[in-house]
Image: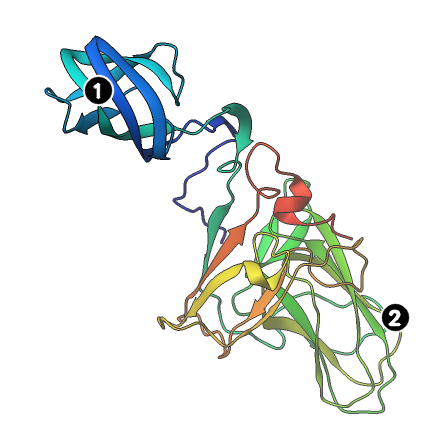
Amino acid sequence: MPQFSDDLFLGAAVGYQGIDAYPNSATFTGSIATTTLTVTAMLSGDPITVGMWIDGANVGTIAYITAFGTGTGGTGTYIVSASQTSASATITGAGNAFLGNPSPMSVGVGPLGRVYVWDVVAQALAASNIAAVQTTSSTIALTAGASVTSVVLASGSTVLQLDCPRAVSIVSGTGTLTDRNVTISGYDYYGQAMSEVIATGTVQSTTVSGKKAFYQIASASISGALGATIAVGTTDILGSPVRILDLGYIVHAGYNNTLADNAGTAVAAVTATATTTTGDVRGTFVPASATDGIKRLVMTIALPAIAVGPNATRIGAFGVTQA
């Protein structure tokens, strides 16, 4: 079920803003005596900087400014790299300057989120692979059917394990139906206990699907006589292994070896306190065509920093506590 992604995580980093270099040039009036450049007027352009190359009709040997004298960007004296004598004339300078006033600050590469790849081949749904068709007014007898396995937990109790996290369905037969609540109890993919109450409704021979993605079913019960048979099975509502806080975090949903996004139905995670009637705490997806044990769902989910990295939380990654 859950897959990992081959991605890059960079933690929060402190950088110095304001020390990047940028091209600069200046035009000024100046003369040179040995290695001293005297600037008497700034004509245009940027301030004069150390490292700036100078050139002009009066400059016999091309040189660059190695240090400030009395000048710090404007008029005044500067030290140049090549000794010479040059009369006062127009000189041009060109080079790179640094942005001023550098200051340390946290800069924005960290913590980066991650891209999670949800890769699953879900088996075909079955209407009675959790509980076969039966008549009962209390406990529903569980029986492992197609794509369901009976598993003994470390605690010694036996549960029915589904092929992947998915919602369950309640199927009623014909008769005079009384609306009853069916309580499904079990565990999610991470072993967290969970329960859901699903109302049967009063429409004969109908299927009612739950909202929560179970991985293991521990028990099922009904709140009274239904007036018809009942069965419990799996659905095509597949449970995400990580919290989908917002549908905008779904980068791509590929299905059945097709490059285009699958036109399925996604439901974002429930973020309020979970109850037995709320939706899934991590979110679900129903592919546009039925699962069959062959079609592969490959969904790329963007995870924010609250789900990964040094400041991540369990809720951020796996949703609110199950009920």
Q: Amino acid at mark 2?
A: Ser
Marker disc for residue 223? 2
Name the residue rendered at 39%, 71% in the picture: 294
Q: Amino acid at mark 1?
A: Tyr
- The picture places residue 123, in percent across and down from the top left corner, at 48, 69
Mark 2 residue element? loop
| Marked residue nearer the N-terminal end (2 or 1) | 1
- Choose between 227 and 182: the one closer to the eye: 182
Q: Name the mark nearer the viewer: 2 or 1.
A: 1
- The picture places residue 69, in percent across and down from the top left corner, at 35, 9
Does residue 7 lie above or below 164 as drawn?
above
Does residue 79 lie above or below 13 as drawn?
above
Looking at the image, the residue that sits furthest to the left is: 60
Marker disc for residue 64? 1
- The picture places residue 112, in percent across and down from the top left corner, at 50, 41
- The picture places residue 39, in percent across and down from the top left corner, at 32, 20
Q: Is 279 positioned to the left or the right of 260 in the image?
A: right
- Choose between 32 and 171: the one closer to the eye: 32
- Choose between 88 and 152: the one closer to the eye: 88
Does residue 180 lie above or below 202 as drawn?
above
Name the residue rendered at 68%, 40% in the picture: 155
Q: Is 320 positioned to the left or the right of 251 in the image?
A: right
Quarter of the view holding residue 215:
bottom right
Mark 1 residue element? strand
Would residue 320 be visible to someone looking at this image?
yes
- Choose between 294 and 242: the one closer to the eye: 242
Quarter of the view holding residue 60:
top left
